[in-house]
Image (cartoon, helix red, strand yellow):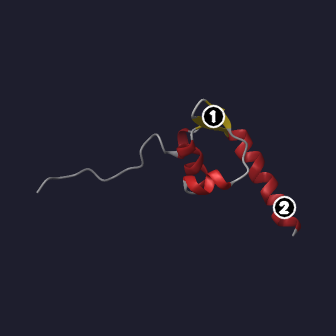
Amino acid sequence: MVDRKPKTQAGYYATDNITGVLTRNQASAYLKICKNNLDALSIPKIHIGKLIRFRKTDIDAWLENAIKVVATC
């Protein structure tokens, strides 16, 4: 038998090291949703060639707006 280390969350996807600009993987981890659902949301995206980035401030503002819409219903 081989002793294996317990699995831990990769640093790339860990939400505790998220800063200003996020990749698709980091943004989906931050919101705790899959990448396909993230693409369907109306969060502003930054396109750099083929790369897609999200500002954390844009995600937080989108969340605040979504909370306000739900609260008024």
Q: Residue at x 41, y 44 (%)?
A: 10
Horizontal side of residue 70 vs 53, given as left or right: right
Q: Residue at x 57, y 50 (%)?
A: 28
Label 1 CA crowd tier, 10 Å (few <14, some 14–19, many 20+): some
Horizontal side of residue 54 vs 14, given as left or right: right
Q: Residue at x 55, y 50 (%)?
A: 29
Circle 2: residue type: Val
Q: Which mark is residue 10?
A: none
Horizontal side of residue 3 vs 39, given as left or right: left
Taking depth in this image into account, of 55 and 14 the one nearest to the observer is 55
Q: Position of residue 48 (x, y in %)?
A: 62, 29
Horizontal side of residue 49 vs 41, given as left or right: left
Q: Are marks 1 and 2 in contact (CB under 8 Å)?
A: no
Residue 30 visible to an observer of this rendering: yes
Residue 58's image quarter?
top right
Circle 1: residue type: Val
Q: Is residue 27 above or below residue 20?
A: below
Which residue lies under the disc numbered 2? 69
Which residue lies under the disc numbered 1? 21
